[in-house]
Structures are given as structure tokens and as C-alpha cells.
Amino acid sequence: MVIPYEGQSFSTLRRQCQQTGRLFEDPLFPAADQSLFYQSNRIGRVTWKRPKELCSDPHLFVDGISAHDLHQGQLGNCWFVAACSSLASREALWQKLILLCERTVL
């Protein structure tokens, strides 16, 4: 059973995005400094981009995955790095996630 976070229903949000032709923008995690930093931005200007804005064929990992592929940077995203690293230690779980994402891509 999936419990919606803060009342957000994935299927409803996906349907809304498909109907309007818009990409999802999370109102609970806006593309702004307050989503990345606990107190204040101490690293300078951050430009938010979607993967397709960085390259034409984006991939998070190529030729498999290892927990050693992930490194914490300057942003406050240790939660994301830790989650990916945990999944990377069990490739079968990572593959399940990839399949789920591929089925739900807009």
C-alpha cells in the first residue's frame, strides 16, 4: 500500500501533468534555495536544471551501479546520495526502481 506524502497522489499528479503537457514541479520541494539548504545558501548561486537540459541522453549510471559511484557534493543532498548508495549495494533493488520509473515517465 502506498501512502501519499502530504496528500500528494502520484497517479493524480501524473495524470494532471499528462493532461496539461507540463512537467511536474513539486510545490513541497520548489526549485529554490530553501529546498537545498537547512539555513542559508553558503555556496553561491544555484541553477536548477532538468537532466535533458544538461545533455540529450541523460543517464544517472552507465554500465551498472556501485555504491562507490556516488559522492556527496556541496549541496545538501546527502539524503539522495545515501538512498542511491543503499540501492546500489543491491542491484536487484536498483533495477526494480528503474523499471518502475520507466513505466511512469511522462
Image: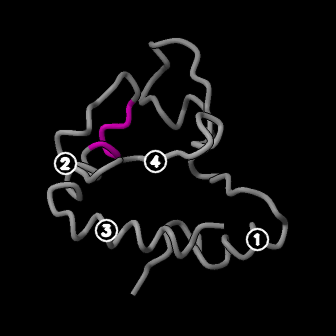
Mark before the other along the chain sequence, 2 or 4: 4
In the rendered image, which residue does mark 1 sit on?
A: 18
Type of amino acid at the residue the image marks with label 1: Gln
In the rendered image, which residue does mark 2 sit on?
A: 66
Distance, label 1 to label 4, CA atoms, is: 23 Å
Q: Position of residue 8 (x, y in %)?
A: 59, 70
Distance, label 4 to label 3, CA atoms, is: 14 Å
Mark before the other along the chain sequence, 1 or 2: 1
Distance, label 1 to label 3, CA atoms, is: 25 Å
- Picture residue at 30% right of the left edge, 38% below the top: 78
The answer to which quarter of the image holds residue 88 is: bottom left
Secondary structure mostly seen in magenta is helix
Q: Is residue 32 above or below residue 12?
A: above
Label disc, if present, on residue 95 of the rendered structure:
3
Identify the element where label 2 is drawn.
Answer: loop
Magenta segment range? 76-81
**Is 14 in front, or is 90?**
90
Mark before the other along the chain sequence, 1 or 4: 1
Q: Position of residue 30 (x, y in %)?
A: 62, 43
Type of amino acid at the residue the image marks with label 4: His
Q: Is residue 93 above or below residue 68?
A: below
Q: Nearer the viewer, mark 1 or mark 3?
A: 3
Identify the element where label 1 is drawn.
Answer: helix
**Is 17 in front, or is 44?**
17
Tell whether label 4 touches label 2 (CB within 8 Å): no
Label disc, if present, on residue 59 of the rendered structure:
4
Q: Nearer the viewer, mark 1 or mark 2?
A: 2
Mark before the other along the chain sequence, 4 or 3: 4
Distance, label 1 to label 2, CA atoms, is: 33 Å
**Number of other residues with Cα within 10 Å of mark 1, as a class: few under 14, some 14 to 19, many 20 or more:** few
